Amino acid sequence: MLKPLGDRVVLQVQEESEQNVGGILLASNAQEKSVIGTVVAVSTQSVGDMEAPKSIKGGDKVVFDKYAGSQITVDGEDYLVVHEKDIIGLV
Amino acid sequence: MLKPLGDRVVLQVQEESEQNVGGILLASNAQEKSVIGTVVAVSTQSVGDMEAPKSIKGGDKVVFDKYAGSQITVDGEDYLVVHEKDIIGLV
Amino acid sequence: MLKPLGDRVVLQVQEESEQNVGGILLASNAQEKSVIGTVVAVSTQSVGDMEAPKSIKGGDKVVFDKYAGSQITVDGEDYLVVHEKDIIGLV
Amino acid sequence: MLKPLGDRVVLQVQEESEQNVGGILLASNAQEKSVIGTVVAVSTQSVGDMEAPKSIKGGDKVVFDKYAGSQITVDGEDYLVVHEKDIIGLV
Amino acid sequence: MLKPLGDRVVLQVQEESEQNVGGILLASNAQEKSVIGTVVAVSTQSVGDMEAPKSIKGGDKVVFDKYAGSQITVDGEDYLVVHEKDIIGLV
Amino acid sequence: MLKPLGDRVVLQVQEESEQNVGGILLASNAQEKSVIGTVVAVSTQSVGDMEAPKSIKGGDKVVFDKYAGSQITVDGEDYLVVHEKDIIGLV
Amino acid sequence: MLKPLGDRVVLQVQEESEQNVGGILLASNAQEKSVIGTVVAVSTQSVGDMEAPKSIKGGDKVVFDKYAGSQITVDGEDYLVVHEKDIIGLV
């Protein structure tokens, strides 16, 4: 798995059929911008003014802006690497 | 319910028929930009330079810019997640 | 009345017929940008780097940029919520 | 007279026939941008990071950028309210 | 080899046939923006507010934004010089 | 003479025939941007975050960006008022 | 020679025939942006937040962005004045 740097977090995007998590369902007109994902890796290494995240940990389910971040594929699974500040909240 | 991070607040938007709160009625030409809502969740976790809100608490009725923030739906109810700085005031 | 947050101030805009206050009359080519108003509410709650105003108080008559701020209506009266830094001066 | 706030200064613009002050005559191709004026009021009240001016006082003749600032009219006289940093120098 | 300054790092870009490293394969729609490379030199000399990198060392395999950085050629090999903040993570 | 404020410096532009100073001749394709001048006045009064210049003094010959600054005319002589940071170096 | 101010450095651009220095040859598609040069003068006088360079000294061979900086000619030789932060690294 990628080990993210700075304030970055690696997220596994939920399948569309799983986008209803803990009672939260992203509204249709919001789905283009916000997505639910699971945290699979969190940076432990600050870089410059990008401090390592403190608000989330592996396994957390989060709502985030899907256009924020870089897409990578590991063993056929899609992941997104986003900055902690782009994570809207915990489910 | 979503647990917001940083300086974020989760708001339940007032029904249009309830937009007259405490004597405040949003002017027609302002309704496109400002909306009255009820605070349903407040971040308790600062992220980077986004400090957890101190000026508002759950249950407060607030005027905010409806284009600021991300829309989510929980159990069929619409919510908006906004930054504390985009809340204009308390009703 | 709205209780403004951060560095915000609630202003009641002067009627046009009252725009001559204390000898000050806004020049015609300036009227599109600057307006005289009366302070009706001042934030007492700083938010992030928006400190609560110290330079003005309720009842002050001020010149401000009318395009700065959000319009609200309370009991049929129009008000503008502006940031302290957008208030040009006291009349 | 308007009492300016923050780092603002109220200036009375020199008549064109008086634009030659202390040997300084604004060059023709500069006249569109720079103007000579007299300081009639200086803010004594800092606002946020706009500190009250220390480099000038009432009565000073200054060169400033005439497109910086807001125009007001008091008792039929035109004035400009500018930020201290937009005053180029003292005549 | 170039000795980078500030927060810069010299990277050797992986051949396309080697872009599957440690199970990570860059997704096709991401390949235009993200690339895997090997760190061949790291600045040890801060410049202004660009601090010398602490999160990576020579030999590390990293994912980075290939449009960030300056291309140089040493002895026929292509290298990219990037800022530490543009390195997404370690493989 | 104008007494400049903040980080400003008043320069007398060299005649073109004098643009070769101390062995320095501005290259033809650079002449449109850089000019040699003589310092005739230096601000001694900091304004906000514009500190009074320390790197130059009256009489210094300097290379500067001629599009930086405001042009004024005193007793028929052309001058430019520039910020210290726009002075490239001393001749 | 020009005595640079702030964080500036005077560079003598390498002749194209000398662009292969210490094994480094700038790639053809990079040559439009990056150039090898020799440091001939370094500022010793900080200006505002532009600190005098510490990472390089006279005689150093450096790779830099040729569009950063101002061109001057001294005794028929071309030089570029660049900011320290625009120097990519030492050869």
Image (cartoon, coloured by chain):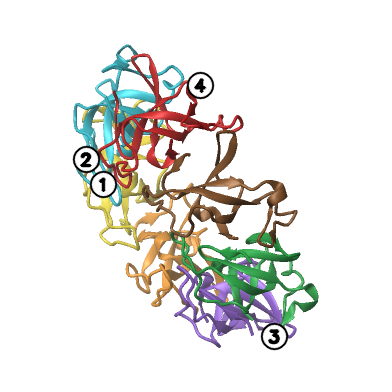
Chain colours: A green, B purple, C orange, D yellow, E brown, F cyan, G red
The image's mark for residue F54 is 2
Q: Which residue is mark 1?
A: F51
What's the chain of the residue with tag 3? A
For mark 1, give the secondary structure: loop
Mark 2–mark 1 CB contact (< 8 Å): yes
Subunit that carries the residue with mark 4: G
Mark 4 closeness class: few <14, some 14–19, many ≥20 residues within 10 Å:
few
User: Disc 3 on helix, strand or loop?
Assistant: loop
Return the residue at label 3: A22
- Which residue, given by chain and number where applicable, does mark 4 sit on? G16
Which of discs 3 and 2 lies nearer the camera? The answer is: 3
- Give the percent coordinates (x, y) of residue F11: 28, 28
Question: Comparing marks 3 and 4, which lies closer to the viewer?
Answer: 4
Chain hosting mark 2: F
The crowd level at tag 3 (other Cα within 10 Å; few <14, some 14-19, many 20+) is few
Residue G37: image x %, image y %?
42, 29
- Asked whether B85 or E64 is in front, the reply is E64
Q: Are marks 3 and 1 in contact (CB under 8 Å)?
A: no
> Are the numbered discs 2 and 4 placed on the same chain, yes or no?
no
| Residues marked 3 and 4 touching at CB (< 8 Å) | no
| Cα distance between the residues tagged 2 and 1 | 9 Å
